[in-house]
Image (cartoon, helix red, strand yellow):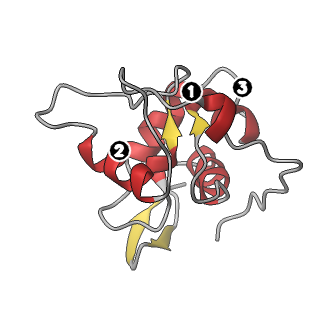
Amino acid sequence: MAPEPIALGGSLITAPSDSHHRIYAVVRRIPKGRVATYGQVARLARMPGHARQVGYALHALPEGSPVPWHRVVNARGAISLRALPNDGLEQRALLEGEGVTFNDTGEIALSRYQWKPRRLHLQLTTP
C-alpha cells in the first residue's frame, strides 16, 4: 500500500516511510542555536546505526519545509558537503544566524552547541 500524502511546508508530499516521519519529528525538536548529529537523530528516532538514512530524509524535504534541516551536522560538528559549488553556505549562514559559531576549520564545538534532550517523546503517527 502506498503512503498517504501529508502536508509539509505548505505543500502535499508523499511520505516515503514511517522512518522519515520519525526523523522529521526529532529534527523539529532541535532548538534554535543547537545542533544534533546525523547519528544522534537516528538514535533518537529509534534507528540506531542509520545516520545515512537521516541524511537521505533531510535531502528529500521540499523547498521551504519548516523542518530545521540546517541544525543537523556530522559527527565532527561540521557541515557535510556534497560536490556542489558553494555547498554548505546556506546551512552555515542559517546556523550563524542562530548564534552557532564555527572554528577555523569549519567545525562547531559540539561540547557547547550539541542538543542534549532530557527526554524525547515522539508522536510516531502521521501528522
Residue at screen point 73% across, 63% down: 125
Whether residue 40 is visible: no
Q: Where is residue 14 in the image (x, y as percent from the top left)?
A: 43, 61
Left/right of residue 118 with respect to residue 110 in the rendered view:
right
Residue at screen point 79% across, 57% down: 122
Labels 2, 1: front one: 2
Q: Say what amino acid the circle numbered 3 marks.
A: Pro
Q: Name the residue under label 2.
A: 92
Q: Name the residue under label 3.
A: 48
Q: What element carries label 1?
A: helix
Label 2 to label 3, Cα distance in Å? 26 Å
* Crowd class of label 2 (few under 14; some 14 to 19; many from 20; radius 10 Å): some
Label 2 to label 1, Cα distance in Å? 20 Å
Q: Name the residue under label 1.
A: 51
Relative to 91, residue 78 above or below: above
Q: Where is residue 57 in the image (x, y as percent from the top left)?
A: 47, 43
Residue at screen point 28% across, 38% down: 88
Q: The N terminus lies in which quarter of the figure?
A: bottom right
Is there CB contact under 8 Å for labels 3 and 1?
Answer: no
Q: Say what amino acid the circle numbered 1 marks.
A: Ala
Q: Where is residue 72 in the image (x, y as percent from the top left)?
A: 51, 41
Q: Is mark 2 on a helix, strand or loop?
A: helix
Labels 2, 3: front one: 2
Label 3 to label 1, Cα distance in Å? 8 Å
Relative to 7, residue 60 above or below: above
Which tag, 2 or 1, sits closer to the chain's start?
A: 1
Q: The C terminus lies in which quarter of the figure?
A: bottom right
Q: What element carries label 3?
A: loop
Left/right of residue 122 with respect to residue 9 in the rendered view:
right
Residue extending farthest to the bottom is 10
Q: Say what amino acid the circle numbered 2 marks.
A: Arg
